[in-house]
Image (cartoon, rainbow, N blue to C red):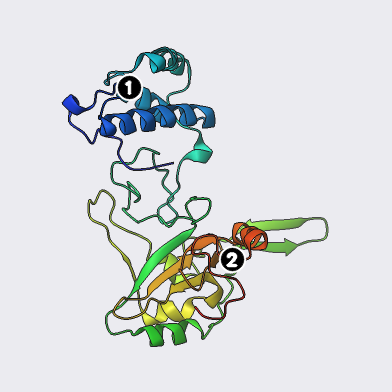
Amino acid sequence: MSKHSLAPAVPPGNSVFQHGDCAKDGQCQLNTLFTLAKQSRALGAYKLARHAYDKLRGLQIPARFQKSIELGSLTIRSKPFHDREELVPLCYRCSSNNPLLNNLGNVCVNCRQPFVFSASSYEVLHLVEFYLEEGITDEEAVSLIDLEVPRHKQESKWQETMSDNAQTLRLDETMDCTGSNDPFTAKLSFEQGGSEFVPVVVSRSVLRSMSRRDVLIKRWPPPLKWQYFRSLLPDVSVTMCPSCFQMFHSEDYELLVLQHNCCPYCRRHIDDPSP
């Protein structure tokens, strides 16, 4: 489902659609809005459906669509004004829910972090793109990530004491309860209320703390720069095609490869050794 603005792209004088004329832009706009309204309502995206019906009311509707659109505009008023929570895109950098109708495009309305979508299901993947500090080459970054420096386990703040007749758990408030074992998490912070996107820039020490299993790298050929992504849900696997660098939920990718024996996006044969 598109997250771009649905503002009319044609002048009002060209938005009339009559059967058999040449108003192609008006026809596409009406068909797009009508389809969006019906599908949004069926999926439970009632706020988005309401917006689509409101836009349709500003167009001159052909007679064969008139009844359906008027009925839909009336019945949508009995539905909740919000979209179903499971349909709303979640930003994995700042944990903000984003509207389906996003005038900013495919970025978070709160932190401006660009979304990374699955190339098969088009769901938002739990990935955050990060950038290297100045002076760090791609080769050095990969070598630092491959070091796999072990992380120290955080000690529990609960202290257990045993007595003759009881077992007691006590919370040690002297320990830092806000500390994090992951230096990358601290880099996700940003200034609230800012209108500019602040990228995540990592140092050599942060790269050393990363696990190779949690990092995906798009190794573009020169003169393009490599792109680095960090998974924020290590237990949920993401697969990247080595040819087109499109990313998928691993379960979706494996199923599609079993069905078609090729990448579902670029059609590269799975047995082809060349990237």
Residue mark closest to the camera, 2 vs 1: 1
Q: Is residue 232 visible?
A: no
The quadrant holding residue 201 is bottom left
Tell which of 72 and 77 is nearer to you. Answer: 72
Q: Quadrant of the N terminus?
A: top left
Tell which of 110 and 107 is nearer to you. Answer: 107
Tell which of 62 and 145 is nearer to you. Answer: 62
Residue 109, percent across and down? 32, 46
Task: Of the two numbered discs 2 and 1 on the same chain, state the one appearing first in sequence.
Answer: 1
Height in image: 78 above or below 112?
A: above
| Residue beneath the point at 49% across and 64% down | 266
Residue 14, percent across and down? 20, 28
What residue type is disc 2 on?
Cys
| Residue beneath the point at 42% across and 12% down | 67
Q: Which residue is mark 2?
A: 262
Height in image: 92 above or below 63?
A: below
The secondary element bearing badge 1 is classed as: loop
Given the current orientation, which residue lies at the most extreme front position?
Answer: 20
The secondary element bearing badge 2 is classed as: loop
Q: Which residue is mark 1?
A: 19
What residue type is disc 1 on?
His
Residue 219, percent across and down? 41, 77
